[in-house]
Image (spheres, rainbow, N blue to C red):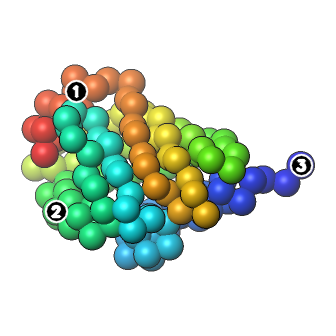
Amino acid sequence: MDEHPNVTKVREWARMMETGDFDAVASEGFADDVEWHEIGRDEPTRGKAALVARMQETLGRFEITGSTHDVVGNDEHVVQLLNVTATRDGRTLHYRTAEIYHMKEGKITARWAFSDDTARILEFFGQS
């Protein structure tokens, strides 16, 4: 059985992120009016430009790597299961997330993340 095209795209974007090609992911993967919901933040980041700025700020302060455990999806939604490692100031945090993407015309229009240990994530990232 062939993989859904949205699943293939998310897998490819994950490989791009692993190699540090964030600009390509932002260009190809995010809708201009994307809403990015993060663990511990009351309001989502709205719009591709704001999301790119937010991610560049975060990636400038933390080293974050992720490996995809699995990806499933259809025309409207993709769920990506990730094992993540974040490092800063000699401290390291390992955690797992489920990333839920709303898709439209092959781009992410909204994202929500859920973790196995929200309290540790909030403490580690300091509600960044």
Q: Residue at x 43, y 35 (%)?
A: 97
Instruction: Report whether residue 112 is seen.
Output: yes
Disc number placed over residue 104 in the picture, else none: none
Q: Hey, what amino acid is under mark 3?
A: Met
Describe the element under mark 1 as helix, strand or loop.
helix
For mark 3, does the 10 Å Cα neighbourhood hold few (<14), some (14 to 19), or many (20 or more) residues?
A: few
Among the 4 quarters of the image, the one containing residue 38: top left
Q: Hey, what amino acid is under mark 2?
A: Glu
Disc number placed over residue 57 in the picture, else none: 2
Q: Residue at x 75, y 53 (%)?
A: 4
Q: On the picture, is 74 further left or further right than 25?
A: right
Q: On the picture, is 73 further left or further right than 17?
A: right
For mark 1, does the 10 Å Cα neighbourhood hold few (<14), some (14 to 19), or many (20 or more) residues?
A: some
Q: Position of residue 7 (x, y in %)?
A: 66, 53
| Sequence order check, earlier mark of 1 and 2 | 2
Q: Hey, what amino acid is under mark 1?
A: Arg
Give the answer, above or below, for where 110 lies relative to 118.
below
- Residue ID for mark 1: 120
Q: Position of residue 17 (x, y in %)?
A: 44, 64
For mark 2, does the 10 Å Cα neighbourhood hold few (<14), some (14 to 19), or many (20 or more) residues?
A: few
Q: CA distance from mark 2 to mark 3?
A: 40 Å
Among the 4 quarters of the image, the one containing residue 71: top right
Q: Residue at x 43, y 49 (%)?
A: 110
- Residue ID for mark 3: 1
Q: CA distance from mark 1 to mark 3?
A: 39 Å
| Sequence order check, earlier mark of 2 and 3 | 3
Q: Residue at x 30, y 62 (%)?
A: 47
Work out which quarter of the rendered image holds the C terminus and state it: top left
